[in-house]
Image (cartoon, helix red, strand yellow):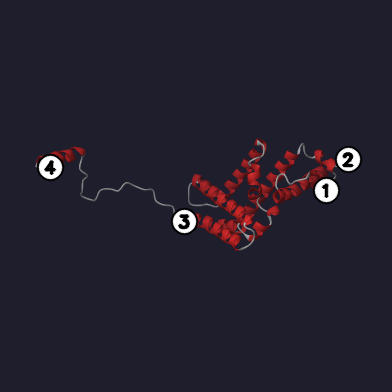
Amino acid sequence: MRYSKEHKLETHARIVKKASVRLREKGAHGIGVADLMKDAGLTHGGFYAHFDSREALVIEAFAYAMDRSTDRWRQLAGQAAPDQRLATIVDSYLSPQHRDNPGHGCAVPALGAEIARESPKTRKVFATKLDQMIEMMSEQFHGGPSKSARRQAMAALATMMGTIVLARAAGNGELSEELLSAGREAVLGRAAAPKPAASKAEAPKSGARKPTAKKAATKAVSAAKN
């Protein structure tokens, strides 16, 4: 039976969505094609009608998962007051709900270490999607130049993602809760901290002149003679 182009696109999207959940739950090497296709209501043989290789599926599923995170942050920011947008994103990200549901959460803490060992093609897609995350987060840092906002966003994301990794490793007990709380404080405290003024050389006091090198040398010779 021949299916319409629309049906094939819908089926393709369903496979990618299912794979993105399994990818985040079990890792890049935890996706069995046969089981995945069964979950999607399809036969194993139908896989290659949609993907050239298993790597192609992993790349699409990973990109899909990262896009969902960026879209969610944008949605959360749009529902909050301007001065609460960053806090809203951080509180949602560093929450017990996100910690306990990796299959529906951010793909980076779930897969970052694995992606670093994948092919250059996979890492390139990851870098592109990560840069999009950084750009979205940089929009939440106001009052500074764009380069400063981007660096703040990088620091915030690194803290948030690292916190989730540690909180998941620690389980769901007191230590894990403390890690989530500390991560929230670190990101939001850094964002709220006033920027130090640029240091300037201390000016001489009014009326006082700094002696020139020539005058200082003359005084030293005079003192030696006395």
- Give, as a three-letter code, the residue at label 3: Ala
Q: Earlier in the sequence, mark 3 or mark 4?
A: 3
Residue 38 is marked as: 1
Q: Earlier in the sequence, mark 2 or mark 4?
A: 2
Q: Are marks 3 and 2 in contact (CB under 8 Å)?
A: no
Crowdedness near tag 4: few (<14), some (14–19) or many (≥20) residues, C-alpha within 10 Å? few
Q: Where on the picture, by quarter, is residue 4?
A: top right
What secondary structure is marked by label 1?
Answer: helix
Instruction: Give x and y (percent) for residue 140.
Output: 55, 52
Q: Are marks 4 and 1 in contact (CB under 8 Å)?
A: no
Crowdedness near tag 2: few (<14), some (14–19) or many (≥20) residues, C-alpha within 10 Å? few
Q: CA distance from mark 3 to mark 2?
A: 61 Å
- Give, as a three-letter code, the residue at label 4: Ala
Find disc 4 in the rendering and name its residue.
223
Residue 122 higher or lower than 143, as above or below: above
Residue 165 higher or lower than 216, as above or below: below
Tell me the quadrant of the picture where the N terminus can be found: top right
Find disc 2 in the rendering and name its residue.
2
Find disc 3 in the rendering and name its residue.
193
- Give, as a three-letter code, the residue at label 2: Arg
Quick one: 30 or 194, which is closer to the camera?
30
Instruction: Give x and y (percent) for residue 168.
Output: 64, 56
Q: Earlier in the sequence, mark 1 or mark 2?
A: 2
Crowdedness near tag 3: few (<14), some (14–19) or many (≥20) residues, C-alpha within 10 Å? few
Q: Earlier in the sequence, mark 3 or mark 1?
A: 1
Instruction: Give x and y (percent) for residue 164.
Output: 61, 54
